[in-house]
Amino acid sequence: MAVQRGKDLLLKLDDAGNGTFVTVAGLRSRRLAFAEETVDVTSADSVDRWRELLAGAGVRRAHVSGSGVFRDAASDAAVRSTFFAGALKTWQVVIPDFGVIAGAFQIAALEFSGAHDGELTFELTLESAGALTFTAI
């Protein structure tokens, strides 16, 4: 993957559940992280007491976070209503010249802040809630 501009990483929401994704926010910073828990199967028979792990047995998850400003009142309302409903919705994370990660996510945190002489900003945290797909661009 060649060098990319951070602003090109997009966060999109399928609010209506019909497969139409809309960019929900003007994110100024964003992060996508994947993790897999390990399953330790070390026993008294493990060679020299070295830890042994069971391949492919851990729980996988994705964590998306970002901060920025909402694009418009509609994107603000979509995110806010999704959070207060505790809904699982389909989201996309578009990574330019790499691919699209898509699947169900739940908003785990939504924070608003602002300075008296600046714009209202927000911070958003999404946690995966099922299998994700990857589509290369």
Image (cartoon, grey):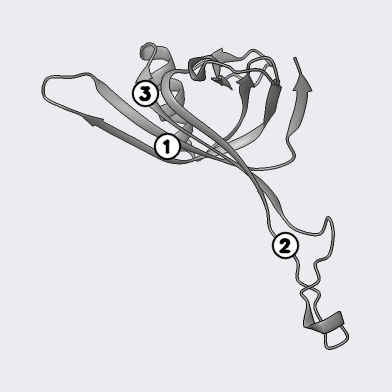
Q: In which quadrant is the N terminus drawn? A: top right
Side of 72 relative to 130 (left or right)? left
Q: In which quadrant is the C terminus drawn? A: top right
Name the residue carrying label 2: 38
Which one is earlier in the sequence, the residue at label 1 or at label 2?
A: 2
- Say the numbered circle drawn on residue 68: 3
Q: Position of residue 107 (x, y in %)?
A: 49, 38
Which one is earlier in the sequence, the residue at label 3 or at label 2?
A: 2
Q: Tag 1: Cα neighbours inside 10 Å, few (<14), some, or many (≥20)?
A: few
- Which image quadrant is residue 83 in? top left
Q: Secondary structure at mark 1?
A: helix
Name the residue carrying label 1: 84
Q: Tag 3: Cα neighbours inside 10 Å, few (<14), some, or many (≥20)?
A: some
Q: Nearer the viewer, mark 3 or mark 1?
A: 3
Q: Residue furthest bottom?
A: 44
Q: Position of residue 20 (x, y in %)?
A: 64, 12
For this rendering, which residue is in front, 31 or 72? Answer: 31
Which one is earlier in the sequence, the residue at label 3 or at label 1?
A: 3
Q: Disc 1 and disc 2: Cα gap in Å?
A: 33 Å
For this rendering, which residue is in front, 35 or 131? Answer: 35
- Say the numbered circle drawn on residue 135: none
**Relative to 96, is 41 above or below?**
below
Q: Amino acid at mark 3?
A: Gly
Q: Amino acid at mark 1?
A: Phe
For this rendering, which residue is in front, 136 or 77? Answer: 136
Q: Secondary structure at mark 3?
A: strand
Q: How many marks?
A: 3
Q: Disc 3 and disc 1: Cα gap in Å?
A: 20 Å
